[in-house]
Amino acid sequence: MRGGYLKFGGTSKSRIALLCCSYLSPAGRKQEICSYPGQISGAKLSYRAALEASVQDLRLSRASVRFGAFELDQDAGELRREGTKVRLQEQPLQILQILLEQPGKVILREELRKRVWPSDTFVDFDHGINNAIKRLREALGDVAETPRYIETLPRRGYRFIGITEYPRHGTASSILSLAVLPLENLSRDPEQEYFADGLTEALITSLAKISAIRVTSRTTAMHYKGVHRPVPELARELGVDAVVEGAVLRSGERVRISVQLIEARTDQHLWAESYNRDLRDVLELQTEVARAVAREIQVKMTPSEQEQLARVHPVDAQAYEAYLKARYYWNKRTGEGFRRGAEYFERAIERDPSYAAAYAGLADCASSAGFWGLTSPSDGCGKAKAAARKSLEIEETAEGRTSLAIAILHYDFDIVAAEQEFRRALELNPRYP
């Protein structure tokens, strides 16, 4: 449930809230249905364990990696271009193999030194790696200034930025559940954490619209922010078959996002891609990534789900940035977080008065402020219901219906009306996280 009252990892807030309504009698008997932060951790772990699904083995071939006109045969240790072997010395080939292990990730020069040049090798490392990268680029027809495959990050390392494909045997997908791990903030600027966290949440929301897969909730996924452990280990804890991870780098009004899909059982990359977009196009990018993931794991979307993903409200870039900051503060679940969140939601609305999601967020902040005693209940309730109804007036969404339901449930104690709103939210998006 939104508002910080119920936290169940990997399930629908509206569905849980609807169950809570069943514990309240028609006569209006009020029972304790709220769980304060920290009280539900045991239940969350039990619920997560109960949801672990048994899956079939996914037969993959990792013997080769394709990108553009090239194919790297890992077993033969050969690079081919349209079937013809490309002559490449051992060290450039090793570097290519290392870069392709984690497409989109920065591989530090020091890591390349350790893996390609053993400690007992006496060589001018800087000259050696620069020469190897040069030869690799020549073989790929790549240019350092405008790279298609190998990107240089000065004084840091290199990154493979091309689109990769992995030949697959069979057609049935065994990936029925996945988690989106918090995107890494490559800027290293703490002031940009809100942006990476906001895009993580948005991607989770987009993927959750696909009923054929179960997506771990944002609340659960964010517990793994900054955690660097093997993917199979994390996936076992989360009870998922695959993990989506990536990184984001913002420079002014431009955004670069690298995303990869990793199968938990084999710890193998199934798909990876990098995107460069203007800030105003990030909303479209989220749905593009969601569709790409669905396509890769071979799940079918219903016409309704396809329509939901295709429906992107054009938004002012500054309004979207304010919205992401608002979500960042809102998710702190503190009095100061609710206050700052409301301020940024209001800024987003000032920039774009037709921003339905910002009104829904403002309703959540008002509900929470009243519930936690930061404002009077009547003031919080009034603002929450007004903002939620404005959101629904602009566009009917599960977010807006849930925001209105929470205000009705916690302030009016109108169980019947709240239940109607929660049910409608589930009709609009059965997998609303």
Image (spheres, rainbow, N blue to C red):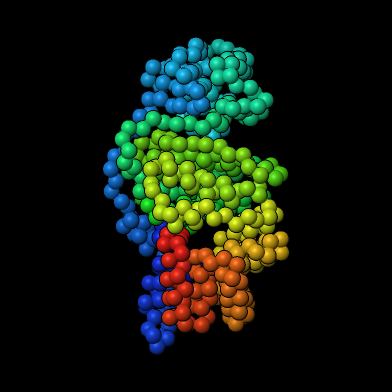
**Residue 278 at x, y percent in the picture:** 66, 44
| In this view, 234 is above or below 115 | below
Q: Position of residue 302 (x, y in %)?
A: 40, 54
Position in image of residue 352 (x %, y %) = 68, 61
Q: Residue at x 57, y 65 (%)?
A: 395
Instruction: Give the left or right position of residue 150, taking residue 31 as reference.
Output: right
Q: Quadrant of residue 48?
A: bottom left
State the residue in front, 63 or 90: 63
Taking the image as drawn, is residue 228 in sight?
no
Q: Is residue 268 left or right of residue 317?
A: left
Which residue, as the protein is rendered here, is positioned at the far front?
A: 303
Residue name at image x 42 percent, y 40 percent:
296
Residue 353 sits above or below residue 377 on the image: above
Percent position (x, y) of residue 273? 52, 36
Name the side, left or right, on which 67 lies relative to 234. Answer: right
Kindly tell me whether residue 75 is visible in this rendering. Answer: yes
Q: Nearer the viewer, residue 226 or 416?
A: 416
Image point 56% across, 27% down: which residue?
149
Residue beneath the point at 41% across and 31% down: 166
Q: Nearer the viewer, residue 119 or 117?
A: 117
Q: Nearer the viewer, residue 30 or 415?
A: 415
Q: How many badges with numbers are in the image?
A: 0
